[in-house]
Amino acid sequence: MLDELEFRSLVEIALLALKQHLYACEEADDAGFEVEEQNGVLNVLFEEPAGKFVITPNAPVRQIWISALSTSFKLDWDGATQQFVLPRTGEALTPLVDRLIRQHLAA
């Protein structure tokens, strides 16, 4: 298991990369969402259909949690791929968030 300092460093890098990716998508033609950051938590806000995703680090269990589509997604650090992944699908953080956004917007 990662120690807390390692975890915080890896989370900071992962969330910064995700935030930059989402900002770039947000600036694209009518992305359909807005990104906010508050105290290390990323929020993805949707107007139509209305909704909100919350992406937050959970230091005690060394995971990144995503609350989206009425579900909680808990990503673990994968040392082999050097990224946070959803264990049941193997999806990395950014592709997972992209998929969840597409699903929400298609609803």
Image (tube, rainbow, N blue to C red):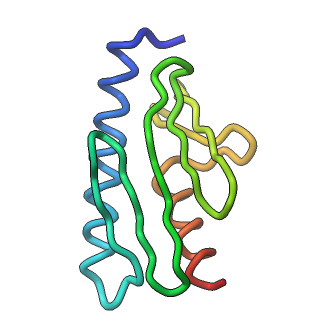
Tell me the residue at 59%/59% (across/down).
68
Q: Decide which of 52, 80 is in the foreground and name it.
A: 52
Picture quadrant where residue 25 is located = bottom left
Picture quadrant where residue 106 is located = bottom right
Q: Farthest bottom residue?
A: 29
Viewport quadrant of the C terminus: bottom right
Q: Decide which of 82, 27 is in the foreground and name it.
A: 27
Where does the image place residue 83, in percent across and percent down from the top left? 47, 36
Vertical side of 14 occupied by 42: above or below = below
Where does the image place residue 91, in percent across and percent down from the top left? 61, 49
Tell me the residue at 63%/75% (across/down).
103
Where does the image place residue 92, in percent across and percent down from the top left? 54, 47
- Callout count: 0
Viewport quadrant of the N terminus: top right
Image check: 102 left or right of 43? right
Tell me the residue at 65%/47% (across/down).
72
Where does the image place residue 9, in percent across and percent down from the top left? 30, 24
Vertical side of 4 occupied by 8: above or below = below
Q: Decide which of 68, 23 is in the foreground and name it.
A: 68
Vertical side of 1 occupied by 54: above or below = below
Tell me the residue at 33%/72% (across/down).
34
